[in-house]
Every structure is written in structure tokens, then in C-alpha cells.
Image (cartoon, rainbow, N blue to C red):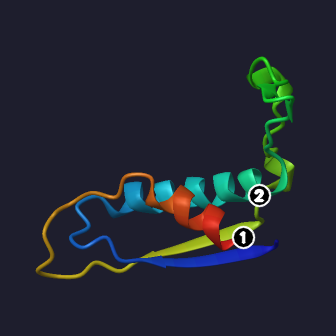
Amino acid sequence: MHKVWCAVDPGIATQPRHIEAMIIVGITNGRSHALFEQVNIVDGEAQDANFDTCPVIRMSEAPGEIEVAVVPTAGSPIGGMGQVGRVKAALEF
């Protein structure tokens, strides 16, 4: 994956740079979830005892360029973004 472009409508964007950062992290985490992360289960028991045995994305494997457009909607109630970037990115891979 060389480039990802994403548009997000958060309603009223009180801190658009924070929203952009959340979406970038969500896209990167979504790629990590899809390509690297797994929990090995044998006979109903997780084999991974801690995070040191669970592979995650490395910087060299992250998407090359991520462009986020924060497109606020005027008149929307303030509600917050939460972890929407991670969930949406993971579902679209």
C-alpha cells in the first residue's frame, strides 16, 4: 500500500489536527490488524502469553503516504470521534 486517502466528517471539528492524527493511527492500526496481528488458540486456550509474542506493524511496513481530509459539517452537534478510524479501517481491508 503506497498511499491512502481518507475523508472524514466529524460534525463540528473543534480540533481538526487531532482528528487527522486519530485517523492516521486508525488506518495504520487497521493495516496491522489485517496483515500481522493474530492470537493463536489451541484447544480453546490462547498460546500468546503477552504482547511480546504478538507481532504488530513496523514503521517500514506502514502505508507510505496517508492523506486525511477533515470535512466538518456546520450545524452538527458536538459528539466526538472516539476510535472510529481504527474500526472503519480494519473493516475495509
Percent across and percent down for residue 14 are 22, 61
Residue 10 location, quadrant: bottom left
Comes first in the chain, label 2 or label 1: 2
Looking at this rendering, what residue extends furthest in the top direction?
A: 49
> Compared to 53, does 67 lie above or below?
below
Residue 56 location, quadrant: top right
Residue 93 location, quadrant: bottom right
Percent across and percent down for residue 15 are 29, 58
Badge 1 marks a residue whose secondary structure is loop
Percent across and percent down for residue 11 are 24, 73
> Compared to 28, does 74 lie above or below?
below
Q: Amino acid at mark 1?
A: Phe
The circle drawn on residue 93 is 1
Is residue 82 rendered to the left or right of residue 4?
A: left
Is residue 17 rendered to the left or right of residue 11?
A: right
Looking at the image, which residue is at 11% across and 80% down?
75
Residue at mark 2: 34
Count the marks: 2
Percent across and percent down for residue 87 are 54, 59
Q: Are marks 2 and 1 in contact (CB under 8 Å)?
A: yes
> Compared to 42, does 71 lie above or below?
below
Q: Amino acid at mark 2?
A: Ala
Badge 2 marks a residue whose secondary structure is helix
How far, Cα to Cα, is label 2 from label 1?
7 Å
